[in-house]
Amino acid sequence: MTDIKVALVTGAARGIGRAIALRLASSSYHVVVGDLDHAAVLRVQEEIEQGGGKSTAVQLDVTAKDSREATLRLCSEKLGRLDVLVNCAGVLKDVLIERMPLTLFSSLMAVNLIGPLALIGASVDLMRRSGGGAIVNISSRAWLGTFGSTAYSTSKGGLVGASRSLALELGRYGITVNCIAPGFIETEMTAALPEHVRQQIFASIAVRHIGQPDDIARAVAFLAEAPYCTGQVLPVCGGRSIGVPELSVNEELKEHQ
């Protein structure tokens, strides 16, 4: 078994997942970057290696058993271990409940909840043989509730509940399980939002700036090396999970017009 620790990051092609992969690589992990977009994760692998890190890119569909097993077989046979699993792959689709087809609900649950849990289940034996490790699930502040986002919030809330139960189940193997709940993070997806929506969100952030993908990556790096922290949900949301700042939303909007 190699002495170099191995981290598997799903949804690593761009945005938060890419930032997590880069951050863990800079912390001396060999990072397996997985995503449906194989060409994109190859670019992330190249970026890591150009920075002096070690990485392996894989095309990974977290909803497919064969794909999950092939990725873990690579970790076991080629790299010899798995120390950190970061479930970052996810999809977001908002729709009001009376218009929501069950197929949409099922697809969100498959990617955001069932796929990650299946990957965890298949990873336990390898992590245990590696001497333990850390599982970090990327949930969302939406698990607290978001208008028009029932399916997404349900899937992310399920991930929180599962993480707490898994922490109790896997702690005996030296495996910690925690969740990070990002708030509004600057990504390609959020950059496409209408400006008035972005301003409303900005007004609700206590620290008065929008989060960056590396804010989440730093939190992941902490939990990856925190063996006495398990079963926790860490909001990284600039204070949005607390409440609206003293300055009202309307007043804030007037200041930014």
Image (cartoon, helix red, strand yellow):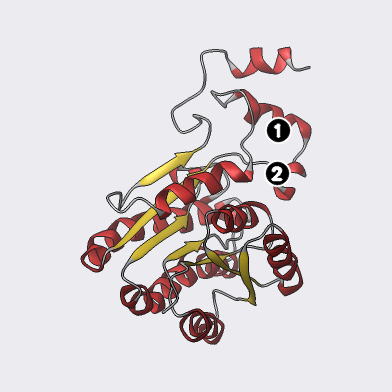
Q: Count all numbered tags in the image, as a single digit.
A: 2
Q: Position of residue 37 (x, y in %)?
A: 71, 71
Which of disc 1 and disc 2 is earlier in sequence?
Answer: 2
Q: Position of residue 189 (x, y in %)?
A: 71, 49
Residue at image x 37%, y 53%? 178
Q: Secondary structure at mark 1?
A: helix
Q: Residues within 10 Å of mark 1 (few under 14, many from 20)?
A: some
**Residue at the spot of label 1:** 198
Q: Position of residue 165 (x, y in %)?
A: 27, 60
Residue 131, placed above or below residue 73: above
Say whether marks 2 and 1 touch (CB < 8 Å).
Answer: yes
Report the amino acid beneath label 2. Answer: Thr
**Residue at the spot of label 2:** 190
Image quarter in which the C terminus is found: top right
| 224 sits left or right of 68 in the view | left
| 214 sits left or right of 135 in the view | right
Q: Secondary structure at mark 2?
A: helix
Q: Quadrant of residue 166?
A: bottom left
Q: Position of residue 181 (x, y in %)?
A: 47, 46
Residue 156, placed above or below residue 11: above
Report the amino acid beneath label 1. Answer: Arg
